[in-house]
Amino acid sequence: MQRILLCVDGEPHTEKALCHALLLAGALGSRLTALHVVDPYLEKYTHEIYAVGRNECRSHLDKSLRQEGTVALAAFVDQANAAGIAVTAELADGERAPVIATWSANFDLVVIGGKVLEGWYRRFESRNLPEQLFQRLAVPLLVVR
């Protein structure tokens, strides 16, 4: 496994995945790429805004989502540098599962964090990224809980 893709979202449930990816990359001498996908999911709600300021609202949301991704990636890069592991950070736009699936074609392993979801409604509500990726990826997927 020479190339590992780590999906970074800045959420607490991904901390273990970050640690596992660093351990794997260090032990195997792999190149590690951290990817944050700016998901347009929230933008669909801005289409419902018909008031003055709609464009400003959408612009603010876009900037906020990109900033969130930039902060999450920077925090991970700092963590990787502290561990002595070189990492490339990438920010992409689009729906998470298709974007990650496209990126995965250039990697030997994809690592993501997974939430423990109880009940069918919670799994449906979360859009269950691990399940979506499992169905799409042609490379191994490591889901860390």
Image: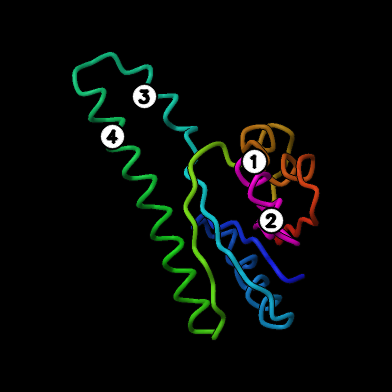
Relative placement, left or right, of 50 versus 93 is: left
The magenta stretch spans residue 100: yes
As drawn, the label of residue 59 is 4
- For the residue marked with disc 3, what is the amino acid? Thr
As drawn, the label of residue 6 is none
As drawn, the label of residue 46 is 3
**Which badge, 1 or 4, is on the more N-terminal residue?**
4
Q: Disc 1 versus disc 3: distance between alpha carbons? A: 22 Å
- For the residue marked with disc 2, what is the amino acid? Asn
Relative placement, left or right, of 120 versus 71 is: right
Q: Secondary structure at mark 4?
A: helix
Q: Disc 4 versus disc 2: distance between alpha carbons? A: 32 Å
What residue do we see at 23% from left, 15% from top? 51
As drawn, the label of residue 97 is 1
Q: Quadrant of the N terminus?
A: bottom right
Q: Position of residue 20 (x, y in %)?
A: 68, 72
Q: Mark 3 Cα within 10 Å, few/some/many (few <14, many 20+)? A: few
